[in-house]
Image (cartoon, helix red, strand yellow):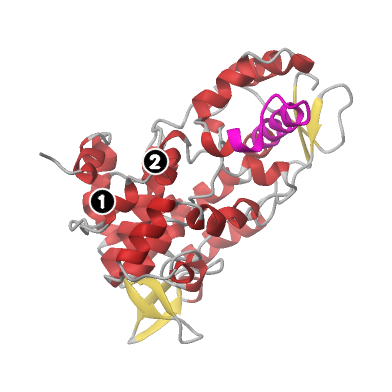
């Protein structure tokens, strides 16, 4: 009889299954029980797309990738490079406190530029899970060793450094668009060129062996980086945040709903909502194909000006026995990175309806 983790992998869509095999041909046995606890399985109903998957505004999104898939992938990357159980579990749990529509709830909380407000519940969720705490006790692991992946630089670090988390969502997002930025063979080529290096502060960091591969990675990273902060994305996330906020204020949706229901179940609540034309506006957003932009505020429209977190990577690369940021040795990569940092959408974005 197959174990649960094998069933999880068997049920993955083929591209993701093959992608996971690239990240770590070996799937560590201890992950089986941790993946299948209820708190992790809830992440299977949450998309990494922050809700954008559900609108015709984003026809390029071809692959529905769950937050559980992302969390497992981060854990597999950490395991591949470290073979460290505690670091791997910290990666698996790093998004365990993610609610429906992911970073849209950060927008609702006013956390636009860091997008970390949902992480505050990580320790609470782990501590309140009997299953997790029993497994940790059995394995001789303290909660403080796995509840904050920020303490492990291979798992996570500050922008613009390369970490397992940043690497994973860059690779999978590039794979998940309709016009793929890279296929699985190219991902394999990129991934096998990565190693643990020491950065300018003497801290371990993922980096590339070859400049040419690093340049290829940075080029597509820059395309994705701009998409995260374009006006389509920002105003869509803000609209979903405002819808949830209005429903929460009217007790039509609870905080527990956001953490316990799948996005499909939350969407059903929105579609059934009779308050303030919420269902109608959600339907208009789902079916709209255009966002309008302006340098001035537009009256009588859903019009917003939003600053959001910039996500970009300036990875290390091995060069003549040293480890150097790619921007210092490649003009091509430097220009790609600068294009991320300088990218500015129009000040205001709006939909052709009021809310």
Tell me which residue sits at (36%, 58%) in the image.
134
Number of residues whose C-alpha sits closer than 10 Å to that of mark 2, classed few (under 14), some (14–19) or many (20 or more): some
> Magenta region's main secondary structure?
helix
Residue 184 lies, with reference to residue 177, above or below; the image says below
Q: Position of residue 155 (x, y in %)?
A: 43, 66
Q: Residue 256 colored magenta?
A: yes
Tell me which residue sits at (38%, 51%) in the image.
131
Q: Position of residue 255 (x, y in %)?
A: 65, 38
Q: Position of residue 138 (x, y in %)?
A: 30, 64
**Front residue of 68 and 344:** 68
Q: Which residues are magenta?
A: 236-257
**Front residue of 36 and 134:** 134
**Residue at numbered disc 1:** 32
Secondary element at image label 1: helix
Q: Does label 2 or label 1 sit earlier along the sequence?
A: 1
Q: Give residue 351's quadrant in the image.
A: top right
Q: Position of residue 27 (x, y in %)?
A: 21, 56
Number of residues whose C-alpha sits closer than 10 Å to that of mark 1, classed few (under 14), some (14–19) or many (20 or more): some
Q: CA distance from mark 2 to mark 1?
A: 12 Å
Answer with left or right where residue 22 lies relative to residue 168: left
Q: Residue 7 colored magenta?
A: no
- Quadrant where the C terminus lies? top right
Tell me which residue sits at (23%, 53%) in the image.
22
């Amino acid at each position: 009889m197959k174990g649960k983790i094998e069933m999880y992998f068997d049920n993955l869509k083929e591209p993701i299954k093959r992608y996971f095999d690239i990240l770590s041909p070996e799937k560590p046995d201890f992950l089986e029980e941790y993946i299948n606890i209820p708190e992790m399985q809830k992440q299977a109903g949450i998309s990494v797309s922050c809700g954008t998957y559900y609108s015709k505004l984003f026809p390029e999104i071809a692959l529905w990738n769950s937050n559980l898939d992302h969390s497992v992938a981060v854990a597999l990357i950490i395991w591949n490079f470290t073979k460290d159980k505690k670091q791997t579990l910290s990666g698996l749990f790093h998004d365990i406190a993610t609610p429906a529509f992911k970073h849209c709830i950060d927008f609702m909380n006013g956390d636009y530029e860091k997008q970390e407000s949902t992480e505050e519940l990580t320790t609470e969720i782990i501590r309140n899970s009997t299953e997790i705490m029993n497994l940790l006790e059995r394995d001789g692991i303290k909660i403080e060793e796995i509840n904050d992946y920020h303490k492990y630089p291979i798992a996570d670090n500050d922008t613009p450094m390369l970490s397992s988390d940043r690497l994973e969502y860059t690779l999978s997002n590039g794979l998940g668009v309709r016009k793929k930025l890279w296929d699985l063979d190219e991902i394999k080529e990129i991934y096998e060129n990565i190693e643990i290096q020491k950065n300018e502060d003497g801290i371990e960091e993922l980096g590339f062996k070859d400049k040419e591969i690093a340049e290829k990675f940075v080029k597509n990273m820059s395309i994705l980086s701009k998409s995260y902060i374009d006006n389509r994305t920002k105003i869509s996330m803000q609209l979903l945040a405002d819808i949830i906020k209005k429903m929460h204020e009217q007790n039509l949706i609870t905080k527990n709903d956001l953490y316990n229901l799948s996005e499909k179940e939350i969407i059903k609540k929105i579609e059934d909502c009779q308050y303030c034309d919420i269902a109608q506006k959600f339907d208009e957003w789902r079916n709209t194909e255009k966002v309008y932009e302006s340098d001035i505020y537009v009256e009588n429209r859903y019009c917003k000006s939003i600053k959001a977190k910039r996500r970009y990577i300036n990875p290390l690369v091995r060069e003549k026995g040293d480890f150097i940021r790619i921007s210092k040795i490649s003009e091509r990569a430097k220009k790609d990175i600068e294009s991320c940092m300088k990218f500015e959408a129009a000040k205001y974005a709006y939909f052709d309806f009021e809310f």
